Image (cartoon, rainbow, N blue to C red):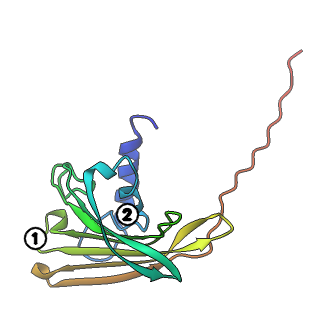
């Protein structure tokens, strides 16, 4: 990735955010967001603790709660320096590390006092790919100061593997 990768990534996120419903500009409503927090490169910025055990989709899972402790935070407010600490939970199969479900929360996000947002994602096995994929995301936020409440649901299906075919020909100069 070149030096322009962060700028391009931000432009893609911002373009997608233009299509969100409601008055809150947000680009963190991505079903795989919490998976990034679990990545070793971001783990030092979070406090993790075991929050319990349960059964989900017939599998024993461990519930892991997390709270962002580092600054700058991964999610930022209206200005790049405005910290918006994230918290949430991940339900993980201890025997193989499979993430079954995630929950992401922020409060007072994007410079909006009183705003509380929550994102829940459920994952299912996609045997044809050998991995788990997001199949449902709930995006909820409430902003009492503006008398706004939003509860959205996105479902994902018909996953396909991208395929690229290249045909090449050349002639050897004489």
In the rendered image, residue 144, in percent from the top left (x then y), is placed at 13, 82
If the image is split into quadrants, where does the C terminus sit?
A: top right
The crowding category of the residue bearing disc 1, from other C-alpha atoms within 10 Å (few below 14, some 14 to 19, many at least 20), is few
Say what secondary structure mark 2 lies in: helix
The residue drawn where x is 35% and y is 57% is: 37
Marks 1/2: CA distance?
23 Å
In the rendered image, residue 86, in percent from the top left (x then y), is placed at 24, 63
- 174 horizontally vs 102: left or right: right
Read off the residue under disc 2.
Answer: 34
Asked if 72 appears above or below 47 in the picture, the reply is above
The residue drawn where x is 15% and y is 54% is: 82
The residue drawn where x is 69% and y is 67% is: 128
Res. 51 image quadrant: bottom left
Read off the residue under disc 1.
Answer: 113
The residue drawn where x is 19% and y is 60% is: 84
- 158 horizontally vs 136: left or right: right
Q: Earlier in the sequence, mark 1 or mark 2?
A: 2
């Amino acid at each position: 990735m070149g030096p322009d990768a962060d700028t391009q990534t931000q432009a893609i996120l911002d373009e997608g955010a233009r299509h969100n419903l409601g008055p809150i500009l947000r680009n963190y409503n991505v079903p795989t967001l919490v998976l990034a927090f679990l990545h070793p490169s971001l783990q030092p910025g979070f406090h993790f603790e075991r929050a319990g055990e349960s059964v989900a989709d017939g599998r024993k899972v461990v519930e892991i709660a997390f709270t962002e402790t580092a600054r700058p935070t991964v999610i930022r407010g209206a200005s790049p320096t405005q910290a918006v600490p994230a918290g949430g939970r991940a339900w993980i199969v201890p025997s193989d590390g499979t993430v079954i479900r995630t929950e992401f929360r922020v409060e007072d996000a994007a410079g909006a006092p009183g705003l509380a947002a929550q994102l829940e994602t459920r994952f299912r096995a996609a045997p044809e790919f050998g991995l788990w994929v997001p199949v449902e995301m709930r995006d909820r936020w409430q902003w009492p100061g503006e008398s706004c409440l939003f509860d959205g649901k996105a479902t994902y299906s018909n996953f396909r593997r991208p395929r690229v075919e290249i045909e090449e020909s050349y002639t050897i100069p004489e």
